[in-house]
Image: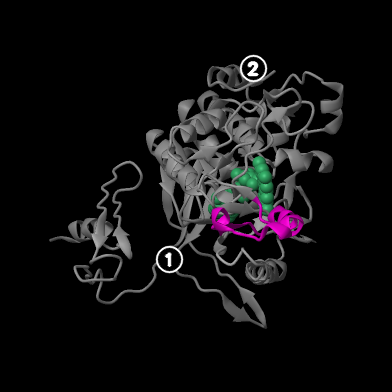
């Protein structure tokens, strides 16, 4: 057996976990899944395989930072190029997944890179499972296109979504959403790298040429003709030098509580029960399981000490709060299903774009010439100008999702999941058009982008 054969074999055997072992080789395109119970029942049994890949090795391409007169200095180093692509989408949240699929459907080679092991970002990892923001007064739905396709496909999954009726905000199952996104990403034949954290933009003369990623295998570069920053926090445009507004916002932590269908409070406690239930969130597609939102205190979501404190405090608070509820007669069977793996950071960096999403545009009901979508979640639909995705000065990069350019009073609408689908869709199509036409994203033919968006089912007024 040569090394390649061994690695191939390791790909299908090394990730076996308790309960089910699923192996994947050859990236998203060539998938060989071996799903089989590991041992008897759920116990860690025998039958696993392990080999030495290399008997003695060390990390290649190292150039360790060192201490020079009390300062940590990073020496010059070469970073291996992992991949080259037309459109690189960084961040696999609701905006990033839609952006990547849209760019691919428009004809570009697309690479999607995500720091965690699943897609969906706050929507799934943050357990933000309530979809709001696609409807305006009168029940009209303004979020269409790939976002609406996702909703329709969730409807076809057993237990994928509830309350999916015109004019109503549906709630999804996070696992169903994760599953569906894998399916859609595979169908689109995207090149995917998970477990890769974008840490630096590669920039020459104000043009973004790609991104440097950090992973368990060290640092690598992905070169691209256009980069879409869908990290939610604008990590890539920030490291590339684009200007942004740094905002604070409420930081919460979502959780799920189970056995809501098994509470048996005494009839005389009806008033108290109503008050308790108010704090136990909303139903999900899983019977008896509610998701519980948390506003949390306003804080800086880029500050490491703050993020650490919030994670610790919120998890403590949720556990203790539930114990308190369980001490009430009839509520003893409630249990904490989980706290979201991902902290609920709402807004941090907001791009300073060529233009921005404005309250006055909504109020005036203007028809912007460069509109690439409409958002909802309030009485009237509001236009999203293409310029809100384009940095003022930086080239070859577009933003999508909760970090696009938006006035403070519009940001709470812009960040809603369906509106992230919409800006992701627009950024993906525009990035692919820029590649096709060999121009900078700021110079794309917006009419062409609008035509393709309409062809892909988007609503542009
Ligand atoms: C507590 C809370 C409650 C909310 N309630 C609602 C609600 O009821 N309804 C609603 O519609 N919306 C709600 N929202 C808003 C909504 O969930 C988010 O704004 C939306 O999901 C953001 O999507 P996004 O794709 O822009 O960003 P994210 O979901 O943050 O996705 C960004 C993705 O990029 C990845 N990433 C980040 N940095 C890097 C990096 N450097 N390199 C590689 N990958 C990276 C992340 O892992 C993630 O997958 C809520 C948000 C919070 C926090």
Residue 257 on the magenta segment? yes
Say if residue 205 shows up in the picture. no
Classify mark 2: residues with Cα within 10 Å, few (<14), some (14-19) or many (20+): few
Secondary structure found at label 2: helix
Disc 2 designates what residue?
447
Q: Secondary structure at mark 1?
A: loop
- In the picture as drawn, the residue positioned furthest to the left comes out as 1
Label 1 vs 2, first from the N-terminus:
1
Residue linked to disc 1: 61
- Of residue 163 and residue 80, the one placed in the foreground of this image is 163
- Tell me: 289 left or right of 414: left
Residue at the spot 33% in from the left edge and 41% down from the top edge: 29
Quick one: 145 or 367, which is closer to the camera? 145
**Residue numbers of the magenta segment:** 253-281
Describe residue 199's horizontal placement relative to residue 46 as left or right: right
- Determine whether 234 is above or below 398 in the image: below
Instruction: Kindly indicate the quadrant of the structure image that contains residue 356.
Output: top right
Q: Residues within 10 Å of mark 1 (few under 14, many from 20)?
A: few
């Amino acid at each position: 057996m040569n090394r390649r054969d061994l690695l191939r074999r390791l790909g299908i055997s090394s990730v076996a976990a308790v309960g089910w072992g699923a192996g994947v080789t050859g990236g998203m395109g060539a998938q060989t899944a071996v799903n089989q119970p590991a041992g008897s029942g759920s116990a860690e049994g025998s039958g696993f395989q392990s080999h030495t890949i290399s008997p003695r090795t060390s990390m290649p391409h190292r150039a360790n930072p060192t201490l020079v007169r009390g300062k940590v200095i990073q020496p010059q180093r070469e970073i291996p190029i992992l991949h080259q692509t037309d459109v690189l989408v960084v961040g696999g949240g609701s905006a990033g997944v839609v952006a990547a699929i849209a760019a691919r459907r428009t004809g570009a080679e697309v690479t999607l890179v995500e720091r965690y092991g699943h897609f969906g970002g706050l929507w799934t990892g943050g357990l933000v499972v309530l979809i709001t923001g696609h409807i305006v007064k009168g029940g009209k739905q303004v979020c269409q296109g790939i976002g609406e396709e996702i909703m329709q496909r969730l409807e076809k999954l057993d237990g994928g979504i509830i309350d999916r009726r015109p004019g109503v905000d549906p709630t999804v199952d996070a696992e169903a959403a994760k599953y569906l996104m894998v399916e859609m990403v595979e169908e689109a034949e995207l090149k995917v790298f998970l477990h890769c954290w974008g840490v630096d933009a590669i920039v020459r003369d104000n043009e973004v040429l790609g991104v440097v990623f950090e992973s368990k295998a060290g640092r690598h570069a992905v070169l691209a003709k256009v980069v879409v920053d869908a990290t939610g926090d604008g990590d890539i445009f920030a490291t590339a030098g684009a200007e942004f507004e740094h905002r604070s916002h409420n930081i919460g932590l979502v959780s799920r509580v189970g056995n809501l269908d098994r509470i048996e409070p005494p009839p005389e406690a009806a008033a108290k029960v109503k008050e308790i239930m108010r704090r136990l969130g909303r139903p999900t597609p899983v019977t008896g399981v509610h998701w519980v939102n948390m506003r949390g205190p306003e804080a800086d979501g880029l500050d490491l000490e703050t993020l650490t404190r919030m994670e610790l405090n919120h998890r403590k608070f949720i556990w203790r709060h539930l114990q308190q509820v369980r001490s009430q007669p009839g509520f003893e069977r409630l249990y904490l299903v989980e706290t979201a793996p991902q902290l609920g950071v709402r807004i941090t960096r907001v791009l300073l774009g060529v233009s921005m999403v404005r309250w006055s545009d909504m109020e005036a009901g203007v028809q912007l010439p460069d509109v690439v979508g409409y958002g909802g979640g309030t009485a009237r639909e509001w236009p999203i100008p293409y310029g809100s995705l384009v940095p003022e000065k930086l080239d070859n990069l577009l933003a999508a999702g909760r970090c696009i350019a938006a006035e403070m009073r519009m940001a709470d609408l812009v960040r809603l999941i369906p509106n992230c689908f919409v800006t992701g869709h627009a950024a993906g199509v525009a990035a692919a058009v820029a590649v096709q036409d060999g121009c900078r994203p700021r110079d794309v033919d917006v009419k062409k982008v609008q035509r393709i968006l309409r062809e892909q089912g988007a609503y542009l007024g």
